[in-house]
């Protein structure tokens, strides 16, 4: 039985790749990028552990009626659970093939590309498009689906290369989603510099105080 520790899974996600997507956030990250807005994903003992088979079943169930354009895996740092990540990716690829679906698999990592290629080269073939490299708060810019300009979008398959080309050919329009569940407010997407502080101010002006926020220790 293979398990994975995740922070959250959500559908539909429309801010981390093209179309209507499943978003899966792995729990645990030791990189500690300055300015990270997802500090709640750092603790390797946080989140919830679940069977990969149960996660796959959930993916199939939630997309049955409205379809699926892609799956985005983020974190946390997914490659800090390499066995679970590979097992999940293999299962997603098998589902895609068996069901004749056309969704893409998009994975984020804060690790440098060269390190991913040397240490996790056996995992990369199961990913269509990869966004590697550490987040740099000093290099924020208008880059679609990325936090900083040093983070490339790399198509690892023909499907992924087509998506990377679409990004290169279209204007950048950053936005993020709002989800309310279990008494918590979730913001899904990649904000621009100072967006979260502006959001706190706008919320306070309307009588909503945001506490225990993920972007501040």
Image (cartoon, grey):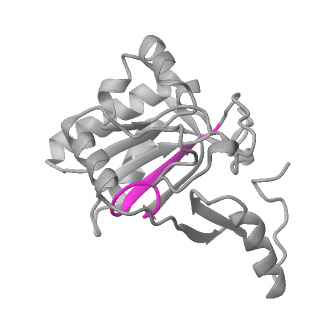
Residue 15 included in the magenta stretch of the image: yes
Is residue 47 something that shows in the picture? no
Foreground of the two, 78 or 3: 78
Segment colored magenta: 13-27
Q: Quadrant of residue 89?
A: top left
The structure residue drawn at horizontal position 19% and vertical position 37%, both measured from the top left corner, is 158
Taking 119 as reference, is 214 above or below it? below
Most extreme residue toward the top, as rendered? Answer: 118
Is residue 114 something that shows in the picture? yes
The structure residue drawn at horizontal position 68% and vertical position 58%, both measured from the top left corner, is 193
The structure residue drawn at horizontal position 71% and vertical position 32%, both measured from the top left corner, is 44
Side of 3 where 183 appears, left or right: right
Foreground of the two, 47 or 138: 138
Where does residue 195 sit, x and y in percent of width and height? 69, 65
Side of 156 where 180 appears, left or right: right
Taking 112 as reference, is 25 above or below it? below
């Amino acid at each position: 039985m293979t398990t994975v520790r995740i922070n959250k899974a959500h559908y539909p996600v429309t801010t981390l790749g093209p179309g209507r997507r499943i978003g899966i956030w792995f729990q645990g990250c030791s990189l500690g990028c300055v300015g990270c807005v997802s500090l709640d994903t750092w603790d390797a003992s946080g989140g919830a552990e679940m069977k990969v088979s149960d996660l796959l079943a959930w993916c199939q169930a939630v997309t049955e009626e409205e379809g699926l354009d892609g799956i985005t895996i983020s974190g946390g740092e997914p490659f800090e659970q390499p066995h679970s990540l590979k097992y999940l990716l293999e299962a997603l690829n098998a589902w895609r093939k068996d069901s004749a679906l056309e969704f893409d698999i998009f994975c984020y990592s804060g690790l440098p590309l060269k390190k991913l290629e040397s240490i996790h080269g056996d995992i990369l073939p199961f990913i269509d498009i990869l966004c590697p490299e550490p987040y740099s708060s000093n290099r924020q810019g208008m880059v679609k689906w990325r936090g900083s300009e040093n983070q490339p979008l790399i198509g690892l398959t023909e499907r992924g290369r087509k998506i990377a080309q679409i990004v290169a050919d279209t204007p950048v329009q950053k936005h993020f989603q709002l989800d309310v569940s279990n008494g918590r407010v979730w913001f899904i997407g990649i904000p621009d510099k100072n967006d979260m502080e502006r959001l706190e101010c706008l919320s306070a002006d309307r009588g909503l105080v945001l506490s225990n926020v993920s972007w501040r220790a």
